[in-house]
Image (spheres, rainbow, N blue to C red):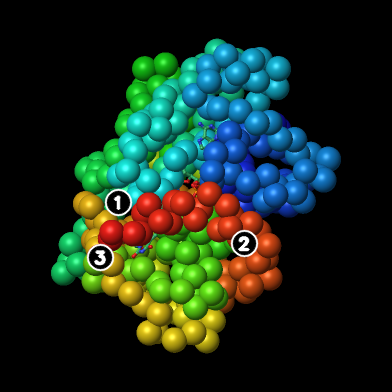
Amino acid sequence: MKILVTGAAGFIGSNFVYFMLEKHPDYQIVGLDLLTYAGNLKTLKTAMEHPNFTFTKGDIADRDYIFHLFETEKFDIVVNFAAESHVDRSILDPGVFLRTNIIGTQILMDACREYGIERYHQVSTDEVYGDLPLDRPDLFFTEETPLHTSSPYSAAKASADLLVLAYHRTFGLPVSITRCSNNYGPYHFPEKLIPLIISRALADESLPVYGTGENVRDWLYVKDHCEAIDLVIHKGKVGEVYNVGGHNERTNLEVVKAVLHELGKPESLITYVGDRKGHDMRYAIDPTKISNELGWEPTIKFDDGIKMTVQWYLDNREWWEDIINGDYQNYYQTMYSNRS
Ligand code: NAD
Ligand code: TDX
């Protein structure tokens, strides 16, 4: 079995590569990544030493490159993680989100049609459903919840989902989609909430919490997400969407405080800053379908996962210090100055 993993040098893609190399020692894995600001080859250093892993640098929105790769490699399964993934960046500059997240998806699926595959899997997000009100804890996103996006990022992801389902219905492409809640764990880029808080708290710097910090996210340890995708690509029904989440809802303030507690840092570092435009209030996944049909259950509780994550960042300082000492400084200035 030969699997193409796009976005392999990013957070979830790299975790998936390591997960699959261990779980399926007989599979060939080809990791593809454009190595944008979010892609980091150091993340794949150990995978590169594995005889069943190869890496190729390239752009999923480059049709000639993708078609040539598919013609040469003859993949059985394609799992598409490649994306522009940060909501705040999509508010500053939406264009690249449409190109990578929508056109890139189309080009990958065109190559699948041309050269044949057993399964095209799209890694999507709970953000395609929009948000839920804080005062209705009884409401959850199901696979039937209408798409109702808030940011250019989520609009691009939802557009891609529609295209994936259209390629199934119109061309019979064997597709599947997972829509997962917020992930956390090793190799999470420090622009995102949890690694940002860890790296800044360790330097005793202020911790920017948007608005009141009451927004709720449904956190899932990244390995549980990888397990869900592995199940869906092998046992999930073609043409279906599966929600993935572990009923781990936390307010942003609770998350920040949990990280501070693990690090032994004071809550006085918390600084309330101007809110994100269009900021979604609450995400909460109903994972009944994947649980009933495929037997998937999350294995890592949030309290354990956050301990493991903090420990990983303490043990792997070089990985994130290299990032935050580079262009990231300019990013932080642009994103967070004038935010009060
Ligand atoms: P990430 O930003 O860490 O990684 C994305 C990777 O894609 C990077 O390595 C980047 O270099 C690569 N990439 C970007 N544009 C590319 C292009 N044109 N061609 C090839 N590679 C390109 O993101 P992530 O958090 O790992 O997210 C991976 C996927 O999972 C995304 O599709 C995202 O929408 C989805 N998702 C993420 C979360 C989350 O909490 N992080 C939750 C649900 C779904
Ligand atoms: O500095 C910050 N302060 C803050 O309060 C940052 C970076 C975030 N936040 C808030 C915004 C969100 O309510 O924390 C919450 C989490 O923010 P992010 O880490 O940016 O994640 P989110 O916007 O929820 O999106 C994530 O989950 C769904 C991923 O980045 C997406 O790719 C995925 O689809």
Location of ligand 2 given as a quarter of the image: bottom left
Packing grade of label 2 (10 A; few <14, some 14-19, many >=20) is few
* Residue 180 to residue 122: above or below: below
From the viewer's perspective, is 293 left or right of 29?
left
Amino acid under disc 2: Glu
Say which label, 2 or 1, has the lower sequence index.
Answer: 1
* Front position among marks 2 and 1: 2
Q: Amino acid at mark 1?
A: Thr
Marks 2 and 1 sit apart, C-alpha to C-alpha, by 39 Å
Label 2 with label 3: CB-CB less than 8 Å: no
Work out whether residue 208 or residue 192 is closer to the camera in this orientation and state it: 208
Q: Secondary structure at mark 1?
A: loop
Residue receiving disc 3: 340
Q: Say whether disc 2 or disc 3 marks the residue closer to the N-terminus.
A: 2
Q: Amino acid at mark 3?
A: Ser
Q: Residue at x 52, y 86 (%)?
A: 264
For disc 3, does the CB lie below 8 Å from ligand 2? no
The answer to whether one can see residue 24 in this image is yes
Which label was assigned to residue 142? 1
